[in-house]
Amino acid sequence: MTAIVIHEVGPRDGLQVERQVVPTDVKEGWIRGLMASGVDIVQVGSFVHPEKVPQMADTDELFRRLSGAPGKRALLSGLVLNEKGLERGAACGVELFCMGISASDTHSRKNTGMGSAEAQQRIIAMGRAAMDEGRKVQVSVQSAFGCGFEGRIPDERVLDIVRAYVDAGLLNISLADTAGHAHPGQVKRLFEAILALGPVNATAHFHDTYGLGMANVYAAMEAGATTFETSFGGLGGCPFTKVAAGNVATEDLVHGLHRVGGRPDIDVAALIAIAKDVAAFFGRELTGRVHRTGALGY
């Protein structure tokens, strides 16, 4: 439990579906709070066309403001979908490039305008190019556990993508439950399978669409996943899937780790304060639990 890595994706995955655009200064304050809380990685935003996702229009500016922060410990990540995004990210200080392929051809076309096969060729080439320049890269399989449009995704389709990553030397690999269809047995089976393919650093990204998010986290841990992508307050969801629903909440996972002696260095009170501030900004209750109930102190 002490080796678990927390990748906070709220500023990107959490905010991308929100119609109310958050001012850059407000985002910056939330991200600086996350960086100070002790989480390991913060995903600042994505490099997409501002007309497609207006919430992400200030991603370049945020990286410029944050990349030189004094005493910064957290790694700053950014999501890129294409070569232009990679170029923009390299210019503004992205420290970890996140990029991926959807195991669902339908989701891939809605999300990127490309089918899965074309996306695979481009993403692997981008990942290799970034690594050749000495940059950190994480590659993902989106819709790895099911798709709102296509339904069940065969394990072998996911494993074929992972094999292509491993063959290309891209070993920092995330399985993302974009549609929230995963269940613990499936999660354990798939993570065990990808870890058997090579020296993979396995990351898990779960949405809580059908209430199994936290159960899936622990199943992934049992299988050997060590990095988890979560969002403040449980905010978020992919705007290009059929049913967009929130992520596992960062403060909920950290609180759960604290209960068994894990990651005592992460300040759960700071995470709760950020989640409350996010909820107040949007004027509604978020789906996370611990920012509402408070943390247990024993």
Image (cartoon, rainbow, N blue to C red):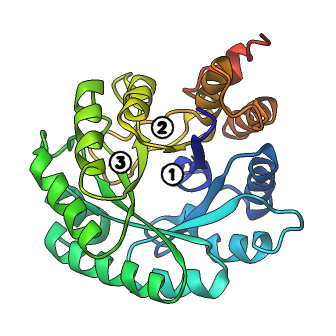
- Measure the alpha-carbon separation of dots 2 and 1: 8 Å
| Res 104 visible | no
Rendering coords of residue 156 (x, y %)? 10, 51
Please state which of residues 244 and 54 is positioned toward the viewer in this rendering. Answer: 244
- Residue at the spot 72% in from the left edge and 58% down from the top edge: 74
Question: Badge 1: few (under 14), some or many (20 or more) residues near its Cα, within 10 Å?
Answer: many
Q: Quadrant of residue 193?
A: top left
Q: Quadrant of the C terminus?
A: top right
Question: Which of disc 1 and disc 2 is earlier in sequence?
Answer: 1
- Residue at the spot 24% in from the left edge and 72% down from the top edge: 167
Question: Badge 2: few (under 14), some or many (20 or more) residues near its Cα, within 10 Å?
Answer: many
In the figure, is residue 247 to the left or right of 169? right
Amino acid on which disc 2 is placed? Asn
In the rendered image of this protein, does residue 142 appear above or below residue 262? Answer: below
| Mark in the foreground, 2 or 3 | 3
| Mark in the foreground, 1 or 3 | 3
Q: Where is mark 2, residue-wise? A: 247
Amino acid on which disc 3 is placed? Ala
Residues marked 2 and 1 touching at CB (< 8 Å)? yes
- Measure the alpha-carbon separation of dots 2 and 3: 11 Å
Q: Quadrant of the N terminus?
A: top right
In the figure, is residue 258 to the left or right of 37? left
Q: Where is mark 1, residue-wise? A: 13
Q: Where is mark 3, residue-wise? A: 176
Find the residue positioned furthest to the right: 70
Q: Identify the mark at residue 65; answer none if there is no mark.
A: none
Question: Which of disc 3 and disc 1 is earlier in sequence?
Answer: 1
Give the structural element (helix, strand or loop) at label 2.
loop
Question: Badge 3: few (under 14), some or many (20 or more) residues near its Cα, within 10 Å?
Answer: many
- Measure the alpha-carbon separation of dots 1 and 3: 12 Å
Rendering coords of residue 54 (x, y %)? 54, 65
